[in-house]
Image (cartoon, helix red, strand yellow):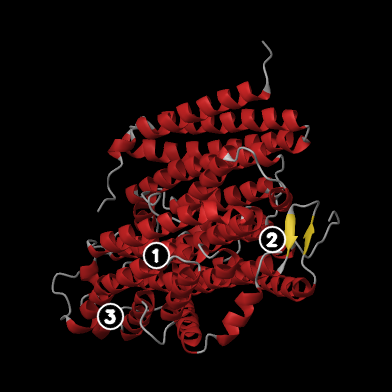
Amino acid sequence: MTEISYLAVGPVAALTLGVVVILLVEVTWKPPTAWLGAIAGVSLLGGFILAVAQWVEASDDPIIRFRGMLALDPFAAFGAVVLTVLGAVALLVAWPLVVEQGRRAAEFIALVLLALAGMILMAAAAHFIMLFLALEVASISLYVLAGFNRHRAESNEASIKYFLLGSFASAVFLYGVALSYAATGSLSLYDTAEFLGETVLLDSAALLAGIGLLIVGLAFKVSAAPFHMWAPDVYQGAASGVSGFMTAGAKVAGFAALARITVTSYGPYISDWAPAVGAIAALSVLVGTMLAIAQSDIKRMLAYSSIAHAGFILTGLVAGIDGVPYVWFYVVTYAFQVLGAFAVVSVVSGPSGAKSPLTDYAGLAQRAPVLAGSLALLMFSMAGIPLTAGFLSKLYVFREAVDAGYLWLAVLGAVASVAGLFFYLRVIVLMYMSPNGEKSPAPTDIRVGDPVRLALTSVAVVTLAFGIVPGPLLDVVTSALPF
Amino acid sequence: MEVTAGWYLALGAVLFVIGAGGMLLRRNALVMFMSIELMLNAVNLTFVAIGRHVGDLNGQVAVFFVMVVAAAEVVVGLAIMISVFRRRASASVDDLAVLKG
């Protein structure tokens, strides 16, 4: 229980080492941006290898290390594997933006890696203080990334909104931790679980309030309704090259943390928190779908669709530990899809642009067939058309919800998916069936750089491969359970 | 009358609610940020009171981490506010309405 384990912090150490090297190299030699990218690539590769090593080690023998601070279990290892891959794809997507930053490129790359380190720790934290620190490392890096183009009004606005509401959410989360501590006398996730397992609380009001505030705080971070107000503004205002990373990373890490807290620490109280999670899920699905229909800017549309997807993912969580594998399945495949969608947006509207009106996409199939094809595939998958990962992930979470007795939630989700077809298919119709928009100022020929092309290919492979052959990923996620 | 842990928890709850109210009602970014700091300090008071009550050091230690994180948030937050202020010489969040829909 107490030993130090370098493997438990391996992926995080690789990424933070990368950050330190990048910043030191930048102040000493001012190397070309490509070198900084290479260092980031090496540290991400190192993090990935160590995460796989964690998986191999932890699948036989899950354990808590660093005096109860960090879990070395398949759940944490899987989170680290996914996040390092996601980070690598995100850097490829953001590469045109990185190059545009000139001498500030090092800071940008460092912030991305630092945010990833925080996200990996969120999936691995076994102690509330550790979780809070991880959450803040990730969040503060993302606040800065949102406002990285400090000369653009949209970027400033996105950053300050994200910062104020994100800090508010962190404070709410922390008060939830304090109330849970008041009820159980422990700040360790696992001691809390042990205490709640063997003690009957005479008065559970403080505990339930604490759990509620914890869920609200994390629901803010994953942009679930009614705590979603910041998401559309932030994802639109941030540079297109980085919005995808902000959406995908925050979702993976936020849901990992939420799943670990709810199913391990508060497992005995599932009948109390599951209805709350179900209500948030239902509201997110409704709000996200209905407001996405009304959008005329694709980045806002994707932001509202990400709120709806947060609702679908929460639908899987009402089943408790049984739903966790399918929460993983959904959040992992969705993270790659949203990253790919924002990658297309970053090419069509420019990597540092904020606005991306849907009219820019009229006739895109003629101007850029690769982009239009990738975006069409991703829209099909997000809408949940069969043979894509998006279909299976929806199917699995609905099944879990029904098994857990939440038939109404599954029905609501299915109806919302059908309504969602409208705005996903609208993009496809616009790209393939409308003439090259005469109003559209976009150039007639859009060049796709190699990094973005590579990123889009990997995203398309993930979306199709796990949509047709979900078996391998299902095997992995069903063993990626918390300790 | 003895002042028990319950009093501190109640004070913490009141401060937290005042902070949350300020965050939701005030329109000046700096005041909103001060409200968040008030919420964090309410949490700190709660942590210390409970740590003392149950005789567990974790509660006291948590406060240091919260203070450090709050300081880091101040650094980033004020930098963001300055970059906004430079553009429009106003700290009111109502003026920030480029993004909507």
Q: CA distance from mark 3 to mark 1?
A: 45 Å
Chain letter, disc 1 residue: A
A53 w.r.t. A129: above or below = below
Q: Residue furthest left?
A: A438
Of the numbered discs 3 and 2, the one sitting upstream in the chain is 2
Could you confirm whether marks 3 and 2 are on the same chain?
yes
**Nearest to the observer: residue A414 or residue A291:** A414
Residue indicated by mark 3: A445
* Residue A320 placement (x, y as % from top left): 57, 63
The amino acid pointed to by label 3 is Asp
Residue indicated by mark 1: A409
Question: Residue, x 42% and y 40% (percent of image)?
Answer: B83
Residue A12 has which mark?
2
A192 vs A333, left or right, is right
The amino acid pointed to by label 2 is Val
A131 w.r.t. A381: above or below = above
Of the numbered discs 3 and 1, the one sitting upstream in the chain is 1
* Residue A315 placement (x, y as % from top left): 45, 65
Q: Residues within 10 Å of mark 1 (few under 14, many from 20)?
A: many
Q: CA distance from mark 1 to mark 2?
A: 37 Å
B74 vs A60, left or right, is left
Image quadrant holding the N terminus of chain A, namely bottom right
The amino acid pointed to by label 1 is Leu
Nearer to us: label 3 or label 1? 1
